[in-house]
Amino acid sequence: MIDPVIETVERDFRIIQDLRLNLVAAVNTHVHADHVTGSGEMKKKIPGCKSMIAEVSKAKADVKLKPNDLVKFGQFELEVRSTPGHTDGCVSYVWHEKGMVFTGDALLIRGCGRTDFQEGNPGVLYDSVHSQIFSLPKHFIVFPAHDYTGQTMSTVEEEVKFNPRLKRSKSEFIQIMSNLKLPYPKQIDKALPANMVCGIFDELETAAQT
Ligand SMILES: N[C@@H](CCC(=O)N[C@@H](CSS)C(=O)NCC(=O)O)C(=O)O
Ligand SMILES: [Fe+2]
């Protein structure tokens, strides 16, 4: 499961049970700022499920991923590609056999992750997306972490052609990203510390007491 969300853990757990699946991993694309990860709660429900996130993020997890690592599940595997720029620890997961890429907040549909907090850097993000995602075969399906218009997927070809930010030159992109003036995510103050400890609030309390 990629980027589980704490509020939907019960729902997702029921689906996993209905389908008689064995969840081997709760993998995160980055330390999210707008919601708390469900990785820790899912691990409590499914012993053996391992939480994963990029080592660079410095967040707690069972498996700290490095670029080019392979996340294996059943007969399949996801390739970990480092795509910093929204945060330093952002990764995208490429499922080569199925022609899919899970881009987190690095590449959104006709957009991209903001670069005005955490370790945001528009130049770095531009290079990440162009070198690690736009270099994939054009038919690969793009699944981002968010969409604010109800869309769920795109393709590499569509984003190369139509992404209004990333189809431009690097200097134009940096200019656009520096002038977005977006409001801060509502949950940021709660989400960032919680996501450093797998979304488990008990761990936060323990850390505060020591
Ligand atoms: N309104 C939402 C937060 C919206 C937001 O800032 N989204 C982030 C991704 S979550 S870190 C983003 O990068 N947006 C890019 C954009 O162009 O909108 C909330 O309050 O949670
Ligand atoms: Fe994010």
Image: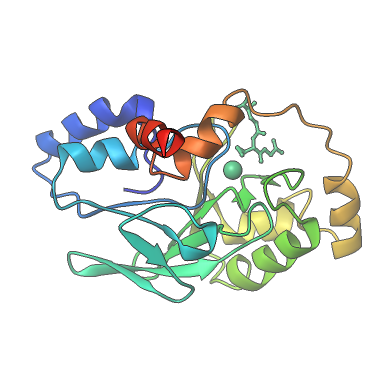
- Front one among 160 and 133: 133
Quarter-of-image position of residue 13: top left
Whether residue 149 is visible, yes or no, is no
Q: Pinpoint residue 86: horizontal percent, then vertical percent.
A: 66, 52
Locate residue 177, reporting x and y percent. Answer: 82, 47
Q: Is residue 174 visible?
A: yes
Q: Residue furthest bottom?
A: 68
Q: Residue 72: x, y in percent? A: 26, 68
Drawn side of residue 191 relative to residue 63, left or right: right
The residue lying at 62 percent from left, 59 percent from top is: 88
Up the image or down, 68 lies above or below 107; here it is below
> What residue is shown at x 78% (from left), y 56% (from top)?
122
Please indicate whether residue 129 sits to the left or right of residue 92 in the image. Answer: right
Q: Is residue 11 left or right of residue 167?
A: left
- Going 87% across and 46% down the picture, which residue do you hit? 178
62 on left or right of 195: left
Ligand 1 is found in which quarter of the picture? top right
Q: How many marks are shown on the rendered structure? A: 0
- The answer to which quarter of the image holds residue 43 is top left
Residue occupying the point 62% across, 61% down = 157
